Amino acid sequence: MTHPKIYAAAHPDKAAVIMAGSGETISYAQLDANSNRVAHLFRSLGLGHGDTVAICMENRAEFFDLCWGAQRSGIVYVAISNRLTASEIDYILGDSGAQILIASLYLGETLDQLQSPVKRYVVGGQKAGWTGLEAALADMPATPVADERAGTDMLYSSGTTGQPKGVRLPLPADPDIAAVSPLAMIAAAAFTFSADSIYLSPAPLYHAAPLRWCMSVHRLGGTVVVMEKFDPEAALAAIEQYGITDSQWVPTHFARMLKLPEEVRNKYDHSTLKCAVHAAAPCPVPIKQAMIDWWGPVIREYYAGTEGNGFTFISSEDWLGHVGSVGRAINAVIHICDEQGEEVPIGEEGIVYFESESQFSYHNDPVKTAESRHPKHSNWSMLGDVGKVDAEGFLYLTDRKSFMIISGGVNIYPQEIENLLVSHPKVADAAVIGAPDDDMGEKVVAVVQPLDWAIAGEELAEELKAYLRPSLSGVKMPRQIDFRQELPRHATGKLYKRLLRDEYWSNRDSKIV
């Protein structure tokens, strides 16, 4: 059995949540009482098993009160990005069928622009037309609701290739709120998370991985330290200050920490780290190698999606013997298939499918659900990635199928080029897209965020081309290098490449600098 209520009874004063910047601390006893009050509030509003609530706020301690309150009352909870526009939030509210929205004043004017007819609660102050959550909870009992039942999350993809896709799973078959969690089991077995874990979460809690791993740590009785907002030096300071043992990152976090001055990187003690997990986006080989050199063999990687159809894992030791791999599947079988659905030989690239009994569907979108399935095997599903496996079953991701560039009939995957660009010492971030070309159909364009905007220009573009040339064949070389002060990257590390591509295709004659 795994649930915060168990640790609230056994270790009531133990810290369940610490906000890294402010030091605000929520004990397990407080988390248990607060989540019970939330569950009673939902019942008082008429919400029962299987109903839906939405949460949209910045990283703050109340996030966990709300999620655990929903989990212990049989509610489906939808975490929405606080970076979305009002229309995007309205879309998710309508698509998910949410009956209540709990938001914070952090959203500012966006709160006034929402059109959805849901009941509205606000955290962190007062807002006209909104009910204050703190006041609404004040008179609620701190004891469990009479009809406790396990709820679950409903999370949306970040919409990097179109409208966000919601993955709605049925309520757990076992209604016990403390039933064993498969994800908590993976956290304990693969990542060695435990009751002794002091876990750092530097990413937004509305995203699948940070929220699910934090709640898995709570299921195991550990302490979650949440950064209000990621900052590379502040992350290193938090590791030292709180004695962080475990953590979860995305490659852009690694890249930003590695590009700190050496004296800053060496200033903080990271010796307490036992496990640093990363996922969400492919990690360039030089960056991962540099992290292992710096932090030691504590770096562990997985590949999975919100859909929950498969999960791969690789340790530092295995990665050093299979450089670039995202690991072997631990709860599914990997199949690499061509466009017709036929399996390709070992070592050849194709669409990555997971064969698994864990099935999913995209909410209100049977077309997208059907597109995710193999044409011949209903229990094979894919996330849209291209890759290959070696003879030992290690998976290597090449790119996302939707990002492929076709230039002169040749298929080009941008990830290889992007990985090289971000390893250049003057590059902070990079995206490679296909832009329109009258002769070739598409041409390779690199959009680069320099580490120092003052050096953006033709001289840097030529330097980058010279840097790429020894490693890339002629067809893969960027025909154009443009510069941006910032790329449209999601806070979780995913790049909104679709937005860049749309810009270039909507104005075929412009060079965007």
Image (cartoon, rainbow, N blue to C red):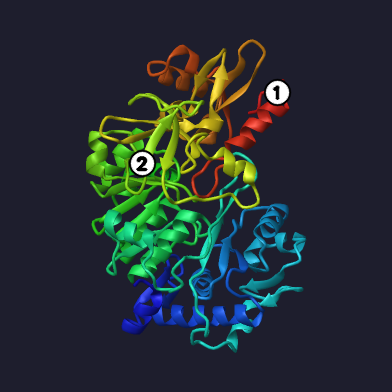
In the rendered structure, the answer to whether residue 48 lies left or right of residue 244 reads: right
Amino acid under disc 1? Ser
Residue 510, numbered label: 1
Instruction: Say which mark, if any, is on residue 281.
Output: none
Q: Nearer the viewer, residue 151 or 343?
A: 343
Disc 2 to disc 1, C-alpha distance: 46 Å
Which is more N-terminal, label 1 or label 2? 2
Helix or strand or loop: what does disc 1 sit on? loop
Res 215 quadrant in image: bottom left
Q: Nearer the viewer, residue 92 or 136?
A: 92
Point out residue 380 in the picture as x, y percentages from the top left corner.
Answer: 46, 40
Residue 160 location in percent, x, y? 58, 41
Tell me where residue 127 appears, x and y as whole percent. 72, 73
Amino acid type indicated by mark 2: Val
Query: Which image quarter holds the N terminus?
Result: bottom left
Nearest-to-viewer mark from 2 and 1 = 2
Report the quarter where the C terminus lies.
top right
Relative height, residue 212 to residue 260 (above, below): below
Residue drawn at 37 percent across, 38 percent down? 334
Kindly identify the residue that appears in the image at 39 percent across and 66 percent down: 224
Q: Which residue is mark 2?
A: 333
**291 lies above or below 220:** above
Q: Which residue is nearer to you in this view: 416 or 186?
A: 186
Determine which quarter of the picture holds residue 86: bottom right
Q: Residues within 10 Å of mark 1 (few under 14, many from 20)?
A: few
Q: Position of residue 123 (x, y in %)?
A: 62, 73
Q: Nearer the viewer, residue 332 or 190?
A: 332
Q: Is residue 425 visible?
A: no
